[in-house]
Amino acid sequence: MSEEINPNRRSFLTTTVQTIAATQLGRLGLTKQHATPATAELPIEGELPSLVGATTWLNSQPLTVDELRGKVVLINFWTYTCINWLRQLPYVRAWAEKYQDQGLVVIGVHTPEFEFEKNLDNVRRALTDMRIDYPIAVDNDYAVWRAFGNRYWPALYLIDTQGRIRHHHFGEGEYERSEQVIQQLLSEAGAGRVSQEMVAVEARGFEAAADWDSLRSPENYLGYARTDNFASSGAMLNKPHSYTAPAQLQRNQWALSGDWTIGRQAIVLNQPGGQIVYRFHARDLHLVMGPSAPGTPVRFRVLIDGQPAVAARGLDVDERGEGTVTEQRLYQLVRQSEPIRDRQFEIEFLDAGVEAFAFTFG
């Protein structure tokens, strides 16, 4: 893991998006807004850096700075398990579709956070699942990330036809402002009459905006390098160990039960029947996980306050409160209705071999 990555990047993003919560409320369904014309002169923040450090390209032949000159360019740094980016994605996808005929080029720079996100098959599957057809620069070596001096997922950079960076935004939110800048740069480029209407976005599933008013649980990693609030006693690093979960957890504490190995980036279950317990306060709970052996599914069941997660089940949980880990990705395990309060989440794995990386909330 590159030391240039901000180890608190998603904590930063949580703070960022909470400050703009007023612009996010009510965006769970179809959203359509009318922009106030952007009249302020945009600053020049620098030049578009080279993209030659990308290890490969998907959905496109490699693109160069010279080829992009004369186009308005949107660069979007992302990694496919990041919930903050997933909630931004419907806007980027809509902009790519709406403005492509007026000269906008959208480029996603996929810079992985976890080792498994370097796997091209995983990235290709994500592109299909998420309906992404614009060019993707795969940045497994962080060369493009470093060229931009970037530190956050997601990040947007808007570049004019002369190859100058004119606007950036880190984290979720401020979609209206970003689209205003797109419209302004296209108008400056002589794209003809550019509509001042904002895109209509229907955000569902993972892509639905968080319930910021009720969100009291920050993202938490499970590997020892960056975890917080681990409540099981006697933690052993990089070796199998049998854990017991305390009877009571405080909000945002988590614990293990069963035979687990706690590694730097993730925890791995060594024997069937292991559990992860988490006390949380949020509408949504997600877990980044996958089978430690590719192609070996791992069954699980989810409980909320000791009962099967039926009414509060997420996208990856069936009507019995059960599911299966089949691939390395983000799983939505809980989406509950109001009232939102402190709840006890438990996931029990019926098979060994799951690898779990991080909890995120929304």
Image: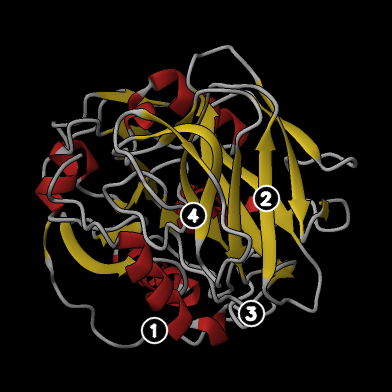
* Mark found first going from the N terminus, 1 or 4: 1
Quadrant that contains the C terminus: bottom right
Q: Amino acid at mark 3?
A: Ser
Report the residue marked by disc 4: 92
Instruction: Kindly identify the residue that appears in the image at 29 percent across and 40 percent down.
Output: 111
Report the residue marked by disc 3: 214
| Whole-percent x, y for residue 300 in the image | 71, 33
| Whole-percent x, y for residue 53 in the image | 14, 32
Asked if the residue under mark 2 is in contact with the one under mark 3, i.e. CB atoms within 8 Å, the reply is: no
* Mark found first going from the N terminus, 4 or 2: 4
Q: Nearer the viewer, mark 4 or mark 2?
A: 2
Give how far apart the Cα atoms at labels 1 and 4 are: 19 Å
* Mark found first going from the N terminus, 3 or 4: 4
**In terms of depth relative to the viewer, which is nearer, 5 or 272?**
272
Q: Identify the mark at residue 71; answer none if there is no mark.
A: none
**In terms of depth relative to the viewer, which is nearer, 331 or 75?**
331
